[in-house]
Amino acid sequence: MSSKTWRRNPLALLCAGMLALTACSSTTTTPPDTTNTAKAAEVTTSKALDELVKGTYGTPPTSAPPPPPGKKVWIVSCGQSAIGCQTGAEAAKEAAQAAGWQAQICDGKLNAGGAFAQCVRQGVAAKQDAIITEAIDCADIQQPLREAKAAGVLTVDFWGFDCDAGEKLFTASAVPAEKYPTNALYQEAIGRARAEWITARSGGQATVVELVFQGTNIGAALHRGFVEGMAPCAGCTVHPVDVTLTTFGDVRQIIESALLRHPDATWVSVPLDSLVLAGAAQAVAGSPRRTEIKLIGGEGLPPNLNLIREEQGQSAAVGQPIDWYGWAAVDTLIRAFAGQEPVSAGLGFQIVDSTANLPKSGAYPAPVDFRAAYRKAWGR
């Protein structure tokens, strides 16, 4: 993948009307000033981008079974050293406590030394009533999930993926939204949103370095969405480069090398804000061409918003409330205890950049008070 460059297929124009978040044909703004990339990025927009600026949010559920009392919940974070993982795990713990339960977090350490499986087994050994996993794929913990099931421990995942073939091993999975009923569809939409921002802000003329998170389903889904979103852009070229869990710490070098190999690239797409913080932003900020390069990252985490405010290597994010996803996981678990199916969380996302949805300070705020909504639904 990293050695290949893909360009738009002319046949993609035939499919443009079927793509929910593409807009090369609908771009209706001032032509980009090629002598001033930053100025062009400020003024170029599109109908689809306008919708993404407004946001795609629904509403949380308005009713739920009462949380059963006295439950103990084990939360497996994908890695407390990554702020995105930490945010989601802490939110799930907060929600579990709001439901009246005991909750503990086990650090999955980005699966170093098989930590994902170890954490699940620790939860089973500790005789927890349920285990919530965050951004961990079934494929990485199949046998521990079977052991949890045999022990009568319920398992719920959010931001992750159940096994595709054969039996589904999680008891339930959080449902992001009615429009995106699976995490795969939700992440693909976010990938398309990232592509739409680049297409619109560049006026449909962009050479892009895309960081592809290999070895994870979330990375694959984000990449699929990005490829689909960029496909109709006749003036766009994308150079994909790979990163994995084992090369997470090498992101700066990976992006720096890609920018050196492709000196015409002035746009960088990074799938997750944790990867931006792991070195992608430093690569852009330290580049001799830093004033020309625009980077769009992931979720809009607090440190990343500071990078956007201070123009320190990140220009935009696809703002999404990971903490909401953590609360949705607990709501899913409440329903699983009652033998009910999960319901839509109402999750969405917004484009955040210097022209839109960037708070003056602090974190990206979800436009819905989901905490209050869940507490009301749970009678808490």
Image (spheres, rainbow, N blue to C red):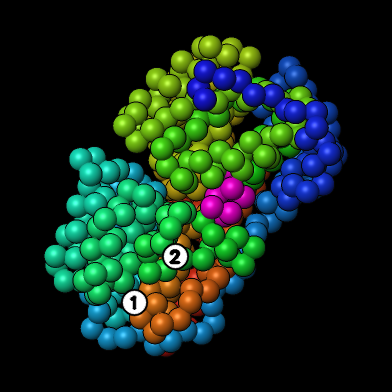
State how many labels appear.
2
* Image location (x, y in percent) of residue 256: 46, 18
The quarter holding residue 209 reads top right
| Amino acid type, callout 1 | Ala
Residue 330 lies in quadrant:
bottom left
Residue 132, image x, y percentages: 32, 64
* Residue 342 vertical position relative to residue 257 in the rendered view, above or below: below
- Indicate which disc residue 173 carries: 2
Q: Is residue 147 visible?
A: yes
Seen in the image, is 33 located left or right of residue 342? Answer: right
Q: Nearer the viewer, residue 91 or 69?
A: 69
Residue in the picture at 60% in, 60% down:
180
Dominant secondary-structure state across the stretch colored magenta:
helix
Would you name the residue on which mark 1 appears?
A: 98
- Residue 113, percent across and down? 20, 40
> Hey, what amino acid is under mark 2?
Ser
What residue span does the magenta drawing correspond to?
Answer: 184-191
- Residue at horizontal 24 percent and vertical 52 percent from the top: 117
Spatial separation of the CA atoms under disc 1 and disc 2:
20 Å
> Which numbered disc, 1 or 2, marks the residue that appears first in the sequence?
1
Which residue is found at the position 17% from the left and 60% from the top?
Answer: 122
In this picture, residue 327 sits left or right of residue 9 = left
Residue at 61% in and 38% down: 226
Q: Secondary structure at mark 2?
A: strand
> SS at mark 1?
helix
For label 2, count other residues whose C-alpha is less than 10 Å away and answer few (under 14), some (14-19) or many (20+): many
Residue farthest along the front direction in this orientation: 166
